[in-house]
Image (cartoon, rainbow, N blue to C red):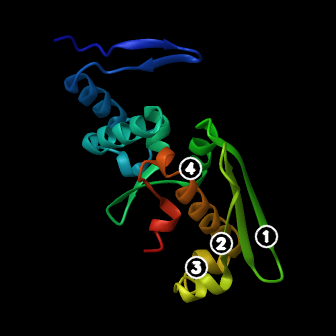
Amino acid sequence: MSNQLTTQPAKNGFLMNPQSLDEAMRFAEMLAASKLVPSAYKDKPADVLVACQWGAEIGLPPLQALQSIAVINNVPSVWGDAVVGLVRGSGVCEYINQDWDEETKTATCTVKRKGEPEQVRTFSREDANLAGHMNKDTYKKNLRRMLSIRARTFALRDVFADVLRGLKVAEEVMDY
């Protein structure tokens, strides 16, 4: 068997396209040895391979998968910004709108899937307090951002579960 990886031209360069498990492992070993992968994947080719497979199953190319997928509390999770990209890029999302009510400290996320009614999800400071999140530094320092991510996560997981294919959102899993 050759030590070469199969490559396929892509619009903006090349895309490595392993054709066998052996090629995929060599690809994963190369990435795991790189200083350009997130530290969680450094010297862990098996984790690289699994993350790349998760990415392939939800539509993320290998390097985007390594940047966007994390294992938190033993749960494969996608970072919030990647979730938005996946949903918007799915072709079934009409819009994602986020709002903030300063007076009530409530984040609102309104989403619309093509052919379906608009859906609204909220997450407030009171919700975070009831869930036990308000004692965490991330909530104390970034309240608006954390509440917004929670409202958005609920909306996107509820309305676009097929796009996310069961993957959880990292910021939510970190709160488990």
Residue 175 in the figure: left or right of residue 31: right
Mark with earlier residue (2, 1): 1
**Towards the viewer: 165 or 4:** 165
Q: Position of residue 100 (x, y in %)?
A: 79, 70
Identify the secondary structure beneath mark 1: strand
Q: CA distance from mark 2 to mark 1?
A: 9 Å
Q: Residue furthest left?
A: 1
Quadrant position of the C terminus in the picture: bottom left
Q: Marks 2 and 4: CB-CB under 8 Å?
A: no
Crowding near pointer 1: few (<14 within 10 Å), some, many (20+)? some
Quadrant hosting residue 32: top left
Q: Is residue 104 above or below residue 81?
A: below
> Foreground mark, 1 or 3?
1
Q: CA distance from mark 3 to mark 4?
A: 23 Å
Q: Amino acid at mark 1?
A: Trp
Identify the secondary structure beneath mark 3: helix
Q: CA distance from mark 2 to mark 3?
A: 13 Å
Q: Which residue is mark 3?
A: 137
Labelled disc at residue 147: 2
Q: Position of residue 87 (x, y in %)?
A: 59, 45
Labelled disc at residue 58: none
> Foreground mark, 3 or 4?
4
Q: Position of residue 56 (x, y in %)?
A: 40, 34
Q: Is residue 10 above or below residue 137?
A: above
Mark with earlier residue (1, 3): 1
Q: Marks 2 and 1: CB-CB under 8 Å?
A: yes
Identify the secondary structure beneath mark 2: helix
Mark with earlier residue (2, 4): 4
Identify the secondary structure beneath mark 4: helix
Query: Residue drawn 46% across and 69% down?
Result: 174
Q: Which residue is mark 4?
A: 83
